[in-house]
Amino acid sequence: MDKSRVTIKDMAMKLNLSTSTVSRALKDHHALKKETIRMVKNLAHKLNFIPNIAALNLLNKRTNRIAIVVPEITNYFFSMALTGIQNVIASTEYTLMVCLSNESYQEEVDIIENLWRIQIDGVLVSRSSKTNNFDHFRQLQSKGIPIVLFDRDCKGLEADKVLVDDYLGAFQAIEYLIKSGCKTIAHIAGVKNLLTKNQRLQGYLDALKKHGLPVIEKNIVHAKGFTYEDGIKPAKLLLNSKHPPDAIFAANDRLAISAMYIANKLNLRIPDDISIIGFDDEPHSIYLNPALSSVWQPGYGMGMLSARILLKHLSEKGALVNEFRHEVFKPELITRASSNKILTSSKNKG
Amino acid sequence: MDKSRVTIKDMAMKLNLSTSTVSRALKDHHALKKETIRMVKNLAHKLNFIPNIAALNLLNKRTNRIAIVVPEITNYFFSMALTGIQNVIASTEYTLMVCLSNESYQEEVDIIENLWRIQIDGVLVSRSSKTNNFDHFRQLQSKGIPIVLFDRDCKGLEADKVLVDDYLGAFQAIEYLIKSGCKTIAHIAGVKNLLTKNQRLQGYLDALKKHGLPVIEKNIVHAKGFTYEDGIKPAKLLLNSKHPPDAIFAANDRLAISAMYIANKLNLRIPDDISIIGFDDEPHSIYLNPALSSVWQPGYGMGMLSARILLKHLSEKGALVNEFRHEVFKPELITRASSNKILTSSKNKG
DNA sequence: TTGTAGGCGTTATCAG
DNA sequence: CTGATAACGCCTACAA
């Protein structure tokens, strides 16, 4: 920080006033002469006075810092969420700190513990897929630091939550596949997690059940992670089997794209031989050949709301809030050529 | 911030010492009894004492905050760079603030001006493509705030710079295309910028010249931005023309993918009819059909180095540094099927 | 070897 | 209506 900043003291001297008067004038204290206020404000404007944040923080026992903890940002959903969060935070006096857990439970724990050390006011969290225990979050809360969870729920943890209806997104995707004529629909699920219910898997299961399709165990494969590479093995497993499925619903676009890749290698036609639907609707999905159907999530909006909720908490500090908000956004199935069996083969529906 | 933190005063009272002694003991002041130091440190450890950052900041006239200003983060290169930066910053007492200019000059100016208001210690910048005037950066520097530029150069601005050799990347791409038999190579360039020299374009031009190929004006098209959409028009322009080129080198992968998309629509075979090479090597490029050749940039490493350079500056504050570092990373051409004419058609080279 | 005092910039309380 | 004082938590001359 540069040293040439004007302080209240400087202005007080120039105006032959006390620092308290200047301070009060700057906040339009009612009991001051209008003239005094005018004078002070004029000078402040002329000298480009800006209150020293460190001094205020010391006084208010705050740091004006918010942290966001996410598994990664090289992913469309998280980068959009971060963009939304940042756009809200940017117009406040808060500073946003980005922390990456790399989908690792241990890294996440370390980060959270460190957040207390380095003194932040509040936290936005999308937990790692490996996280089965939420005590690190509880510990932070117990120190008075509010947490807003977004995208990935922590069952049993009481906090504000901004989620997307994964169940619905999956359900709709499966129903669409069924209606387009698919009979054996496989699912490449995300990382297996002991504690948190996998809503996308559940939506898949319930949709099958609703339409009287059998659940075939070997048609449900858990990926080891969420990268393209992680999708290769599950896709091979499914598509190389004796009775390959006629559709794959993947837990995200990367896994879906890997499945498309393998299908291509095996000379399977998409969607004629195998329909594929992803989740996330990354921008490049539309430029694949064929274009990938996917479930879109409102990352930007979720980010904005999460940030607003956290800011609200911080401004209400002291007023103990026992009620947590629980917001659920609706995803949207975007159908494209990769799942458009009907459209492609018989041209009778859009 | 929670209020239950232990302060030096608390410890001083418990130990019947003055705060100065405690303060000194914590930093191993030479003139203190070993015994005293031990006692203080033990207690500090037992009570989990952590110095109050706001107090230190007030004292040191710092804020411990660093800002990174980038056009966007929903892009592989920037998100990797940010990841690298964050990983360096995370182990320090600094907090990283992410600011997005959305490729807009005006937004960038606003951000930079605001950075001074909100008091940050240093800035990492990758300027917007529309930025032709660097006075906002100079103004910030003149207030004593160090700036490290990364990825996108600002010609004429004196600052630390961490760049990638765009010229070389483009040159190698074009040479490769020429060697693989392409005769008319087009270029989809990025946003036209009055001031900064377009190194990728220059590399393209020089490679053509070196190999005696003519520069055809209409085979150089500037995109309006860097999104997939921005690539559609240039691609149509090139591929719909009377004498379409037999290769396209695009300024980034998104533009290249749009070109692939249009080529597909026009039933042009890639690479037989048209070779395509991008820039950035986004992870999904390998899963396209055909896989996209691209110039890889070491985003993560560039981010790390930029952060280290900035930290160095901040630690040396006071010692006026007149020498700026100027680091240039080497990119790497990754060849895949989209440009592999020889391999694909006659199988005689890899 | 340790304590005292003053200051970093701001605000709140109490006087006047 | 305005000023003096203390306080936030820490550090560092200067004293002792």
Image: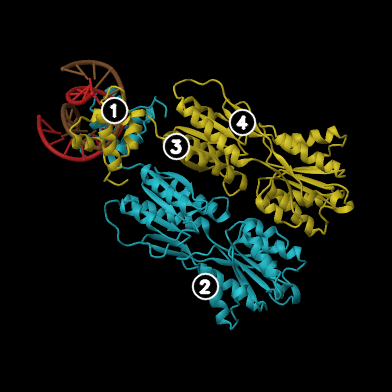
Chain colours: A cyan, B yellow, C red, D brown
Q: Chain of mark 2?
A: A
Instruction: Please state the horizontal and vertical placement of residue A335, each as a whole percent of the image.
Output: 64, 68
- Residue under label 1: B24
Label 3 in the same subunit as label 2? no
Q: Mark 3 touching mark 4, by CB under 8 A? A: no
Q: What residue type is disc 3 on?
A: Thr
What is the crowding at mark 3: few (fewer than 14 residues within 10 Å), some, or many (at least 20)?
few
Q: Chain of mark 3?
A: B
Q: CA distance from mark 3 to mark 2?
A: 42 Å
Q: Is residue A63 left or right of residue B252?
A: left
Q: Mark 1 touching mark 4, by CB under 8 A? A: no
Q: CA distance from mark 1 to mark 3?
A: 22 Å
Label 1 in the same subunit as label 3? yes
Which of label 3 and label 4 is nearer to you?
A: 3
Instruction: Give whichever of A244, A90 is nearer the camera.
Output: A244
Which of disc 3 and disc 1 is earlier in sequence?
1
Instruction: Please state the horizontal and vertical placement of residue B37, each as a whole percent of the image.
Output: 28, 30
- Residue under label 3: B92
Residue at 23% x, 32% y: name it.
A20
- In the rendered image of this protein, does residue C6 appear above or below residue A318? above
Q: Mark 1 touching mark 3, by CB under 8 A? A: no
Q: Mark 3 touching mark 2, by CB under 8 A? A: no
Q: Chain of mark 4?
A: B
What is the crowding at mark 2: few (fewer than 14 residues within 10 Å), some, or many (at least 20)?
some
Q: What residue type is disc 1 on?
A: Arg
Q: What residue type is disc 4 on?
A: Cys
- Residue under label 2: A202
What number is the disc on residue B154? 4
Q: CA distance from mark 4 to mark 2?
A: 52 Å
